[in-house]
Structures are given as C-alpha cells and as structure tokens.
Image (cartoon, helix red, strand yellow):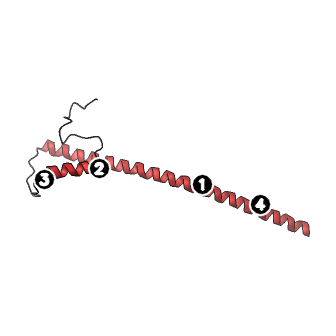
Amino acid sequence: MDHDLRHDPNDPEAPHAQRSPKERLLEAAQRGRDGDEHAPDVRTFDQVVISELVRLVDTIQTLSLRQDVFEEELGARRDAIDARLSRLEDSLKRVADSVQVLILRLGDEK
C-alpha cells in the first residue's frame, strides 16, 4: 500500500480518502468531547490550515459524489423519457397512417 510520505496516516488531521459524513461527525465530536464550545483553539497555524484544507477536500468530494448520483438519476430519467417519446412517435405514426387510409377511402367513395 502506498502512503503519501508527507503525511502521517495515523494523524487525525491527515487527509483521508473520502471519509463518510458519519466519520467526519465522529471525529468532530471527539475533538470537542469536553462539551466546552468556547474552548480556545490551541492548534498551530499550520494545523488550522491543514484542518481547513481537509474540510474543503471533504466538501469537494461530497459534492462530486452528489454530482455523480444526480448524473446517474438524470441518465435514468433520460432513458425513460426517450422510451416514452419513442412510444409516442410510434403512436403518432399509426394515427397518421389511419388518417391517410381514411382519406384514401373517402376519395374512392366519391
């Protein structure tokens, strides 16, 4: 298994491959487990920046996954719509053929 040597994979602030929302919530709860919402932030500037970058990467990954889901749903809906349009086109052709036969019959009766 290849690891990015710039980051310790056991470091809680290390970027993870697409963490689930539940994992992110558990990590956030663990960081603030003492319940003191106004505790001073004692992280270094580098730790704050890395933490924010990890949060942004998580957000981008979430949006990317949502886009994939939307594209799949849209593709499925397009297939259903294409099938309906095809059936409608076939029905219209049958109606047009029936009307043309009626016109020909009326012309023959005159």
Query: Mark 3 highlights which residue?
Result: 33
Q: Position of residue 92 (x, y in %)?
A: 69, 61
Q: Secondary structure at mark 4?
A: helix
- The answer for how far apart the CA atoms under marks 3 and 4 are is 75 Å
Query: Mark 2 highlights which residue?
Result: 59
Magenta residue span:
9-13
Query: Mark 4 highlights which residue?
Result: 97
Q: Are marks 3 and 2 in contact (CB under 8 Å)?
A: no
Mark 3, mark 2: which one is toward the viewer?
3
Quadrant including the C terminus: bottom right
- The answer for how far apart the CA atoms under marks 2 and 1 are is 36 Å
Q: Earlier in the sequence, mark 4 or mark 1?
A: 1
Q: Are marks 1 and 3 in contact (CB under 8 Å)?
A: no
The answer to whether 28 appears left or right of 34 in the picture is right
Give amino acid for label 4: Asp
Mark 1, mark 3: which one is toward the viewer?
3
Mark 3, mark 4: which one is toward the viewer?
3
Per the picture, the main secondary structure of the magenta-coloured stretch is: loop
Give amino acid for label 2: Thr
Q: Earlier in the sequence, mark 3 or mark 4?
A: 3
Q: Position of residue 94 (x, y in %)?
A: 73, 60
Q: Are marks 4 and 2 in contact (CB under 8 Å)?
A: no
Q: Which mark is residue 30?
A: none
Quadrant including the N terminus: top left
Give amino acid for label 3: Arg
Q: Secondary structure at mark 3?
A: loop
Query: Mark 1 highlights which residue?
Result: 83
